[in-house]
Image (cartoon, helix red, strand yellow):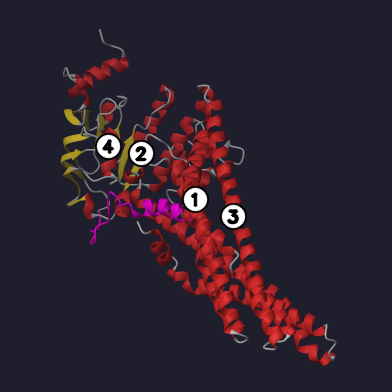
């Protein structure tokens, strides 16, 4: 993966802003050079006690360069930081846009903490790329050319001596610093990601870590990773200090070189003594353009490593894509599954094998079976998180890949095993399903979900903060909030995956009563291993190891000596 060319292509839309930042940087350094040069001329000339009129231009020059050096520095920082923030915005949006189609199929192997590190720390580490790696060398080249041209007006040997010293500071020193910092940059990018993952895991799993007595072990792991990062940062600081010292040495060597060449010229009368001071201070001031280059070279490898981690996500191919010519989706189509097989990546055994079912619009189907039978996999295939390994799933007259993903997921409402709530208020979490809903619609959805009384009893009502993952609410309240979201969305097709998971028997009964009201007039697939309320379903599909082993109504399946009856009797403790 060629990272640097890709970063340069990424910056192409910002080329004008990079150029403006570089020009302002050049103007800042030029003003610094002009300030030192005119100050040298003024002091050296004043020592000869000339007429004050002979110093007027130099006096004005000192004031001009001194004033505008600060102005240009301010404008340069303003332009560069504005460019950096716009670049960060573009990178973050680009990262999320690339990540969203990958979930969940292509993100299963990544930890949430790792994704967070890539989206935040790695992206932020790229913010210095355009300023340090692009703008700084442009400034250095421009200043070197201008200064060498100025010195050549006195004598070409002075320009050659300056160019040699400047090349040593702008090329040789950054190469050495970059070589020293390369392995450190790679290790820092990796260790920083591991530290971020350890911290997030520790925070999210704090309760379990404390319950199993592993809190101290996790703390020691974080301390060890933090120590590695701190030690590497200290080594990086030493390398950076070496780069600064080397630039200072080269700067002084350049001044000595100019003096060695210029003093004989003064003796020979080729140049005057005032010009000697100007030549030395102008040459020294020009090295301001070189100072950022060692640090840019040192941290380049860290930025490249971070970019490589980001591009790994951006380059991943989604498991499913929108069709080039999508067809329109009916409001309430029937569902047909024909000979569907599915195998998860890096798994040998099929999750589904030869699955067939037909569900007309408005009918209710329960999919039951033991854990690992493939029930949830069916829900994932209906939402096109994956496509079947073989066979087809049809809605109306077309297969699922013929529809746009957005259209497909708009008409299918899902209540998954895990209720995902976001850090925010009750209102914000409910509006996720229908951002334009008014207060009356919110109240109606909450009332049907038997949640309105609970919401009104909260400290701030609808604007109550529910915490991370909604932990300020009970399990039953979180499930009812998820149901209220479904009601607010009002989808024609429902997929209910273990809707009563983790609830007590009384809450489960009340929840199922609400769900059966929600099912009225909707095409419904109820995925569960709890055989409660099965008598209300039009058909029951029994899965085992990815295959259909039984199908029929609740009464017909109980009449058989099959898996369904065994599960039913085990749950209700009527086995002899």
Which numbered tag is attached to residue 185?
A: 1
* Residue density around tag 2, few if under 14, some if 14–19, many if 20 or more, within 10 Å: some
Labels 4 and 2 touching (C-beta < 8 A)? no
Q: Give the CA distance from mark 4 to mark 1.
A: 42 Å
Q: Is residue 311 magenta?
A: yes
| Residue 561: quadrant of the picture | top left
Identify which residue is drawn at 29% across, 33% down. Answer: 527
**Residue hosting label 4:** 377
Q: Please state the horizontal and vertical placement of residue 530, each as a whole percent of the image.
A: 32, 25
- Element type at mark 1: helix
Q: Earlier in the sequence, mark 1 or mark 3?
A: 1
- Element type at mark 4: helix
* Residue density around tag 1, few if under 14, some if 14–19, many if 20 or more, within 10 Å: many
Q: Which residues are magenta?
A: 303-329
Q: Earlier in the sequence, mark 2 or mark 3?
A: 3
**Residue hosting label 3:** 240
The residue nearer to you, when weighing 374 against 77, is: 77
- Element type at mark 2: helix
**Residue furthest top in the image:** 576
Q: Give the CA distance from mark 4 to mark 2.
A: 23 Å
Q: Please state the horizontal and vertical placement of residue 46, each as a whole percent of the image.
A: 82, 84
Which of the two marks, 4 or 1, is nearer to us in this view?
1
Which numbered tag is attached to residue 518?
A: 2
């Amino acid at each position: 993966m060629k990272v640097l060319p890709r970063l340069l292509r990424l910056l192409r839309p910002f080329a004008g802003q990079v150029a403006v930042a570089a020009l302002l940087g050049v103007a800042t350094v030029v003003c610094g050079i002009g300030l030192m040069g005119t100050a040298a001329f003024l002091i050296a000339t004043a020592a000869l006690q000339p007429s004050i009129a002979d110093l007027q231009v130099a006096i004005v020059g000192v004031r001009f360069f001194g004033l505008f050096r600060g102005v240009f520095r301010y404008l340069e920082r303003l332009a560069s930081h504005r460019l950096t923030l716009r670049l960060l915005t573009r990178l973050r949006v680009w990262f999320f846009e690339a990540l969203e189609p990958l979930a969940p199929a292509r993100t299963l192997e990544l930890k949430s903490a790792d994704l967070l590190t890539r989206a935040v720390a790695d992206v932020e580490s790229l913010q210095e790329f355009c300023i340090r790696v692009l703008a700084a060398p442009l400034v250095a080249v421009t200043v070197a050319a201008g200064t060498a041209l100025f010195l050549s007006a006195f004598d070409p040997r002075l320009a050659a001596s300056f160019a040699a010293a400047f090349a040593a500071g702008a090329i040789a020193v950054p190469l050495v610093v970059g070589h020293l910092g390369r392995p450190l940059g790679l290790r820092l990018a990796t260790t920083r990601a591991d530290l971020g993952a350890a911290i997030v895991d520790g925070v999210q799993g704090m309760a379990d870590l404390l319950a199993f007595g592993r809190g101290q072990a996790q703390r020691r792991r974080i301390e060890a990773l933090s120590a590695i990062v701190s030690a590497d940062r200290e080594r990086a600081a030493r390398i950076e200090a070496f780069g600064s010292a080397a630039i200072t040495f080269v700067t002084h060597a350049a001044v000595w070189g100019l003096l060695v060449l210029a003093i004989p010229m003064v003796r020979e009368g080729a140049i005057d003594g005032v010009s000697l001071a100007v030549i030395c201070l102008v040459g020294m001031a020009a090295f301001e353009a070189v100072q950022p280059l060692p640090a840019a070279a040192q941290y380049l490898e860290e930025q490249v490593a971070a970019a490589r981690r980001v591009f790994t996500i951006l380059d991943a191919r989604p498991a499913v894509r929108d069709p080039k010519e999508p067809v329109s989706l009916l409001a309430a189509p029937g569902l047909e599954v024909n000979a569907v097989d599915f195998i998860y990546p890096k798994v040998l055994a099929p999750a589904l094998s030869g699955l067939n079912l037909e569900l007309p619009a408005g009918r209710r189907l329960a999919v039951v079976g033991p854990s690992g039978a493939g029930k949830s996999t069916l829900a994932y295939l209906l939402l096109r998180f994956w496509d079947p390994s073989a066979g087809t799933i049809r809605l109306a007259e077309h297969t699922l890949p013929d529809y746009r993903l957005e259209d497909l997921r708009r008409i299918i409402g899902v209540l998954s095993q895990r209720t995902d709530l976001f850090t925010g208020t009750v209102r914000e979490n409910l509006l996720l399903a229908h951002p334009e809903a008014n207060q009356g619609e919110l109240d109606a959805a909450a009332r049907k979900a038997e949640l309105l009384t609970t919401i009104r009893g909260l400290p701030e009502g609808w604007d109550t903060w529910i915490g991370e993952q909604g932990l300020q609410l009970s399990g039953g309240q979180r499930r009812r909030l998820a149901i209220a979201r479904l009601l607010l969305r009002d989808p024609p097709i429902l997929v209910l995956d273990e809707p009563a998971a983790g609830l007590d028997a009384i809450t489960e009964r009340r929840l199922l009563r609400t769900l059966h009201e929600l099912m009225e007039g909707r095409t419904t697939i109820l995925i569960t291993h709890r055989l409660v309320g099965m008598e209300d379903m039009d058909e029951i599909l029994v899965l085992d190891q990815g295959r259909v082993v039984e199908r029929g109504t609740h009464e017909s399946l109980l009449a058989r000596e099959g898996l369904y009856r065994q599960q039913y009797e085990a749950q209700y403790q009527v086995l002899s």
